[in-house]
Amino acid sequence: MDSYVGPPASLLKPLSIPNKVLLGAGPANCSPRVLHAMSLPVLGHLHPECTQLMDEVKAGLQYVFQTKNPVTLAVSASGHGGMEMAMCNLVEPGDVVLVTVAGIWGKRAADMAARYGADVRILEKNPGENFCLRILEGALARHRPVLLFLVQGESSTGVYQPLQGVGPLCRRYDCLLVVDTVASLGGVSVQTDQWEIDVIYSGSQKVLGSPAGLAPISFNSRALSKIKSRKTPVSVFYWDVKHLSNYWACSDEPRQ
Ligand SMILES: Cc1ncc(COP(=O)(O)O)c(C=O)c1O
């Protein structure tokens, strides 16, 4: 075969990856169970064994998130993909979105929400600080947002954000609570249903001890009602929770 571009030299020699000790905030070393799973044969995405595995992954994610939300799945992306999916589905142009910023990840979420047309309001603290219920309530009362965004483990500063009491507060102000647990899920308590978190997402390569490339995410019924009542379609087909939850058989409708 004629090749305009020849094979790179790296293809012609064995792949060699050194063994490194990976420490927090991640990526972390994978568990032997994960490494073994990655050496197993590939299945077709509609093979019954694959859909059975997807059901098992879903149940595992419900366990780690501590939720009974039927719409709990993993998207093929790093942690940013979870953030993108949450914002893309929940935000409509003109929606007031309140983002807490005390490090990199709040800033990133604010940028994403703005790209989906949100009227972004920032509640800022110095790096190294977190947000108490009194400050959060003041901001909810002032801005009346449709969505409040918090990071449970702000990896850029190493700060933990307590979440107890935030969900009920958001309900009082008719606001959805979205929580980033990319750097915390598996390492600290996460009680999605008990804490009344509406959308929660994470990433696979940190405390969960898997390679990067999966973003677990869960939507409760309040979040799904907001999405159902959208006046405009979700602007990115790939992130649309309607399609992804059908693929993951999260509803009673047949998988397509
Ligand atoms: C708190 C937090 N959110 C989001 C991300 C983005 O995740 P990823 O790098 O997997 O896209 C990170 C990554 O460090 C993070 O620590």
Image: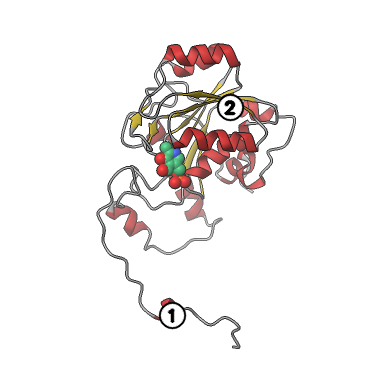
| Residue 132 - label | none
Of mark 1 and mark 2, the one earlier in the sequence is 1
Quadrant of the rendered image holding ligand 1: top left
What colouring style does the render use? secondary structure
Q: Nearer the viewer, residue 4 or 33?
A: 4
For residue 205, above or below residue 197: below
Which quadrant of the structure image shows residue 203? top left
Which quadrant of the structure image shows residue 125? top left
For the point 60% across and 88% down, the residue is 2
The secondary structure type at the circle numbered 1 is: helix
On screen, residue 253 versus residue 72, left or right, reads: right
Neighbour tally class for label 1: few under 14, some 14-19, many 20 plus, Cα within 10 Å: few
Query: Which amino acid, by three-letter code, is at mark 1?
Result: Ala
Query: What is the tally of numbered marks visible in this picture?
Result: 2
Query: Which amino acid, by three-letter code, is at mark 2?
Result: Ala
For residue 207, above or below residue 67: below
On screen, residue 30 versus residue 215, left or right, reads: left
Residue marked by disc 2 = 223
Q: Position of residue 221 (x, y in %)?
A: 57, 26
Q: Nearer the viewer, residue 7 or 186?
A: 7
Q: Say whether residue 244 is visible.
A: yes
Label 1 beta carbon less than 8 Å to ligand 1:
no
Q: Nearer the viewer, residue 49 or 88?
A: 88
For the point 53% across and 82% down, the residue is 6
For the point 64% across and 31% down, the residue is 91
For residue 35, above or below residue 15: above
The secondary structure type at the circle numbered 2 is: helix
Q: Position of residue 250 (x, y in %)?
A: 55, 38
Residue marked by disc 1 = 9
Q: Say whether residue 202 is visible.
A: no
Residue projecting furthest to the front: 126
